[in-house]
């Protein structure tokens, strides 16, 4: 019995040592870098976003490291390509959290990938900070204490889009053109609800499939329904197809698009057909607010081009994590997660504080494309 | 519904339908020549569009040099397709089915290569056929200038192909080789040369189509598969896989069905209606409704 007790005791000590739960573990050690991971798409459909995400995060990391790091310890970033694909994301996130032992992970940025992998953060008890915007993984739906959103979610953006159409444009007969993915259809659900609150009936809803290149019939029906505003709820290439044919058919009702209509991926494809389009955006580099301007200038100086959404949210996210580690006084992921829930930080996206849905910000812009830049009509915080 | 609306929709349907027909032309050509269905047919369109984009936008070659370089590479690709895919399969006893499976894999391979090289995001095609808002006004109807280029090239390709296949010695060689290789060889036809010409012409036709379609489809992975590939095959089948005119008419019919089912029924059911009609047509006329060549066989 005595022998067995000794064996059990030695075994317990070994187990504790192997798990690394020795005294002092988690304390910030200036001689050891703090490993953080990033999962973003660098190939596949969302590849253009991957570069903005990485550059936004790296800019913040370089600034923090150059200024002495986090209590003396420097950030060390491990980057993975998740191809905006749920199964690839599962592989790389697992590797980052369990093999690399990163204290926190940024991304994935695609909602479908987040929905597929957020439970891994829960299992690893490590914070996952994402720029994905689907309302379908709000805290009230997924109940994941370790999942945090760094950008305004799509539900908020659509509500603001509708508010602008109803209150500023004073449209009475809006018509909708909508794509077939979850991004588009969940936006339509929110739009229907929001218009109903204003007592406005959507006079016609036309569908298009991703990849469609002719929407003459849909636009003919919208025109014949007498719309006084076109609400665009599609992805970027489809938005470009709609606008080219909208101009071709010489339709004149104002066009107010969802977030995919407010990015260079749309304006590049649509060319001059995009002029005059109004869109709800998560970020606008033309904003002259000092923190935004400082970020845009630093980004341009480092990467030689203008930042685009969602670069700003990963930049803010790294600073947010720094503050959480300092507040926790530890690199222990559970303590960082607890700190993330309480801290407040003011960055490029204004004041950031976690709400009941685990969203840090509701910021969005309503802007109009003038052929070169998106002119801000209103900034909503 | 105004008459102008109908006309505008007919123009839209005919243009997009012609693009399906163009892709179908490549299928028809290879079938007519070597009796094989190339499932990587659509890849030539994507490769040509990306090549043109690279030469024109990144290497600043200018329109004609970019066009010629892209088409030359695509023609050489056709030759490689023969020697690296078709010949080894035939030599090892493979037949039509093996060729179909191999080219299906090749189609996916090219999509992956382009995805890894250029990324998945569509790129804007340079406005060589006119700006996005450059339209030609015909009374109350406005037509994008790129549509005119499509119509013109479709017409030229069809006439050229018809003339080549029906009126020239090369055309006779191609058709004779397709019908019976051994007999053609015994009659003194250079089967080796004929097969190479068939492969090169099939990829070239679809390559030209790819460059022409890029302003509508953008320089994107969609040009290498997806709905345009399927509808290209459907157009070819509606022409009985024989008739170049039949393939184009098949494509236009599909384009019009899509537009009118949206206009008169619902955009939500556009693809369901279009494909139901296509399946019904094929059940009724498996040799194609626009096939005048084998009618009555």
Image (spheres, coloured by chain):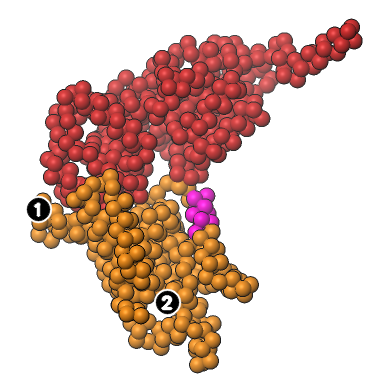
Instruction: Write down the region rendered in magenta.
Output: B107-117
Most foreground residue, A223 or B133: A223
Residue drawn at the location 10% of the way across and 51% of the way down: B1
Height in image: A31 above or below A238?
above
> Residue B284: x and y, percent?
32, 66
Height in image: B13 above or below A305?
below
Chain ID of residue with mark 1: B
Instruction: Answer yes or no: are tags 2 and 1 on the same subunit.
Output: yes
Determine if the magenta segment contains residue B137.
no
Taking the view exactly as shown, the residue that stands out farthest to the front is: B284
Label disc, if present, on residue B32 of the rendered structure: 2
What letter labels the chain drawn in red? A
Inspect this view and state whether residue A207 appears. yes
Identify the element where label 1 is drawn. loop
Most foreground residue, A51 or A304: A51
What letter labels the chain drawn in orange? B
Q: Which SS does the magenta portion mostly show?
A: helix
Label disc, if present, on residue B2 of the rendered structure: 1
């Amino acid at each position: 019995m005595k022998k067995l007790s000794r064996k059990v005791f030695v075994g317990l000590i070994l187990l504790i040592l192997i798990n690394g739960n020795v005294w002092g573990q988690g304390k910030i050690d200036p001689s050891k870098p703090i490993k953080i991971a990033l999962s973003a798409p660098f190939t596949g459909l969302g590849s253009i976003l991957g570069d903005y995400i990485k550059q936004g995060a790296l800019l913040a990391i370089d600034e923090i490291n150059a200024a002495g790091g986090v209590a003396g310890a420097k950030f060390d970033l491990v980057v993975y390509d998740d191809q905006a694909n749920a199964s690839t994301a599962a592989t790389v996130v697992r590797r980052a959290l369990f093999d690399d032992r990163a204290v926190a992970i940024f991304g994935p940025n695609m909602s479908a990938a987040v929905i597929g992998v957020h439970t891994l953060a829960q299992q690893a008890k490590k914070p996952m900070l994402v720029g994905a915007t689907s309302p379908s993984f709000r805290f009230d739906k997924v109940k994941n204490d370790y999942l945090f959103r760094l950008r305004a979610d799509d539900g908020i953006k659509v509500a603001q889009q509708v508010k602008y159409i109803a209150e500023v444009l004073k449209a009475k007969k809006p018509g909708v053109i909508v794509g077939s993915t979850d991004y588009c259809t969940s936006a339509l659900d929110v739009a229907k609800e929001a218009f109903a609150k204003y007592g406005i009936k959507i006079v016609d809803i036309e569908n298009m499939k991703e990849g469609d290149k002719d929407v003459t019939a849909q636009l003919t029906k919208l025109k014949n329904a007498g719309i006084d505003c076109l609400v665009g709820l599609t992805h970027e290439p489809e938005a470009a197809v709609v606008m080219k044919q909208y101009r071709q058919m010489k339709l004149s009702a104002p066009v107010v698009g969802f977030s995919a209509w407010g990015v260079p991926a749309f304006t590049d494809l649509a060319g001059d057909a995009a002029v005059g389009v109004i869109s709800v955006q998560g970020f606008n580099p033309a904003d002259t607010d000092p923190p935004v301007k400082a970020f845009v200038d630093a980004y341009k100086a480092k990467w030689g081009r203008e930042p685009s959404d969602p670069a700003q949210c990963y930049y803010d996210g790294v600073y947010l994590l720094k503050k959480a580690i300092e507040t926790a006084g530890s690199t222990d992921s559970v303590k960082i997660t607890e700190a993330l829930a309480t801290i407040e930080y003011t960055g490029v996206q204004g004041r950031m504080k976690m709400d009941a849905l685990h969203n840090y910000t509701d910021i969005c812009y309503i802007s109009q494309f003038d052929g070169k830049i998106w002119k801000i009509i209103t900034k909503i915080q | 519904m105004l008459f102008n609306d109908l006309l505008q929709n007919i123009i839209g349907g005919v243009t997009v339908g012609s693009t399906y027909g163009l892709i179908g032309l490549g299928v028809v050509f290879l079938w007519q020549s070597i009796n094989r269905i190339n499932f990587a047919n659509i890849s030539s369109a994507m490769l040509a569009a990306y090549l043109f984009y690279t030469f024109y936008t990144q290497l600043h070659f200018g329109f004609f040099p970019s066009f010629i370089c892209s088409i030359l590479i695509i023609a050489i690709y056709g030759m490689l397709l023969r020697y690296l895919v078709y010949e080894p399969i035939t030599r090892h006893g493979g037949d039509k089915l093996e060729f179909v499976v191999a080219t299906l894999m090749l189609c996916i391979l090219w999509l992956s290569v382009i995805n890894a090289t250029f990324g998945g995001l569509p790129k804007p095609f340079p406005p060589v056929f006119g700006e996005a808002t450059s339209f030609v006004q015909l009374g109350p109807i406005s037509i994008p200038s790129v549509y005119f280029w499509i119509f013109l090239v479709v017409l030229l390709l069809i006439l050229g192909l018809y003339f080549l296949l029906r009126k020239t010695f090369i055309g006779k060689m191609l058709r004779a080789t397709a019908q019976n290789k051994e007999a053609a060889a015994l009659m003194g036809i250079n089967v080796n040369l004929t097969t190479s010409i068939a492969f090169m012409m099939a990829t070239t036709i679809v390559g030209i189509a790819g460059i022409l379609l890029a302003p509508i489809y953008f320089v994107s992975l969609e040009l290498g598969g997806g709905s345009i590939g399927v509808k290209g095959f459907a157009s070819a089948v509606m022409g009985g896989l024989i008739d170049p005119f039949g393939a184009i008419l098949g494509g236009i019919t599909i384009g019009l069905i899509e537009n009118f089912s949206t206009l008169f029924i619902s955009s939500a059911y556009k693809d369901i209606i279009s494909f139901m009609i296509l399946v019904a047509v094929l059940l009724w006329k498996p040799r194609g409704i626009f096939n005048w060549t084998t009618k009555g066989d």
